[in-house]
Image (cartoon, grey):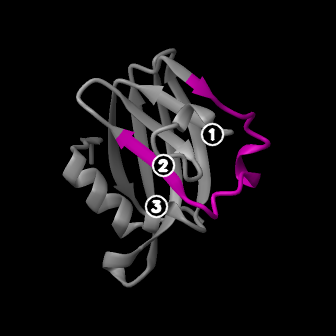
Amino acid sequence: MPVKPLSALTLKNLLERIDFARQGEIRSLTHLSPTSIEIRFSVQDIARGYDWIDVLFRIEGVNDAKLVSDNVLPGLDISEGITVEMDANSCALAIGNYGGRANEAPFYILGTSIGYEELPFSA
């Protein structure tokens, strides 16, 4: 299944469905190119009776990011969930509750567009 683009409505529905990835886990961070990054989370899906799934976000047009090394990634605390925002010209994904100020988060990716893909749970 290919990555699906997100709109404001589909983003809102997805984030509510996965409870903003609260208590989830970061599975991987992949640099596809200098301006394209994928991040994969394991989360509980409310629509599937809180069954675990993986959700992969792909950010294109990356123009700013604050990342961590691969060995630190699994230990990042995402108990507050994630912030994902978008408008007509930009998008942001941050670890934690950073609405309107994603670039203040300890981990963030800023770009021009964002899409997602639902994947089977990776144990």
Find out whether the residues at labels 2 and 1 contact each other: C-beta distance under 8 Å: yes
Mark closer to the chain start, 2 or 1: 2
Kindly identify which residue carries mark 3: 20
Q: How many marks?
A: 3
Question: How many neighbours does mark 3 have within 10 angstroms: few (below 14), some (14-19), or many (20 or more)?
Answer: many
User: Is residue 70 covered in magenta?
Assistant: yes
Horizontal side of residue 108 vs 58, given as left or right? right
Mark closer to the chain start, 3 or 1: 3
Q: What residue type is labelled 2?
A: Thr
Residue depicted at 57% across the width and 35% down the height: 108
**Region of the chain picked out in magenta, as a range:** 65-85
Kindly identify which residue carries mark 1: 105
Q: What residue type is labelled 3?
A: Phe
Secondary structure, mark 1, is loop
Residue 89, quarter of the rendered image: top left
Secondary structure, mark 2, is strand
Q: Residue furthest front?
A: 100
Kindly identify which residue carries mark 2: 83
